Amino acid sequence: MSAAEAQEVKNVLLQSHDQYRQLAERHHQLDTRLHELSEKHYLSASEQVEEVTIKKRKLALKDQMEAIARQHRPNSRAL
């Protein structure tokens, strides 16, 4: 599957799949917070823990989103 086809599957899921959309929204929220932390010159100990936790949560969300996307991709073996 090409990158364009994968992106099309994601776009369709964002419009039609509630769970996928919720995961994507949460991923975006975490990404925004991570960006806020990355702009600081110094992170406190609690902010460092938060940064690591956010990265782990984002990865878990991305894994869940990818699992949903795999279920909705056309079967490439049928070609």
Image (cartoon, rainbow, N blue to C red):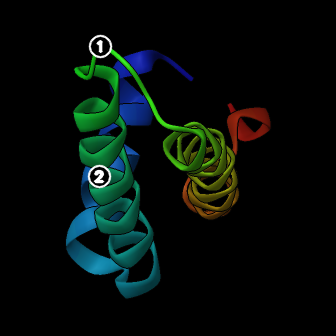
For label 2, the crowd category at 10 Å Cα-Cα, with few meaning under 14, some 14 to 19 and many 20 or more, is few
Between 31 and 76, the one lying in front of the other is 31
Q: Tag count in the figure? A: 2
Residue 32 screen position, x and y as percent: 24, 44
Q: Amino acid at mark 2?
A: His
Residue 63 screen position, x and y as percent: 69, 50
Q: Amino acid at mark 1?
A: His
Location of residue 70 with respect to 48 vertically, above or below? below
Between 78 and 70, the one lying in front of the other is 70
- Specify the quadrant that holds the C terminus: top right
Q: Residue at x 69, y 34 (%)?
A: 76
- Tell me, yes or no, if residue 46 can be seen here: yes
Q: Which residue is mark 2?
A: 28
Q: Which mark is residue 77?
A: none
Q: Is residue 15 left or right of residue 66?
A: left
Q: Earlier in the sequence, mark 2 or mark 1?
A: 2
Q: Which residue is mark 1?
A: 41
Q: Residue at x 43, y 18 (%)?
A: 3
Location of residue 5 with respect to 52 vertically, above or below? above
Quarter residue 31 falls in: top left
Which element is circle 2 on? Answer: helix
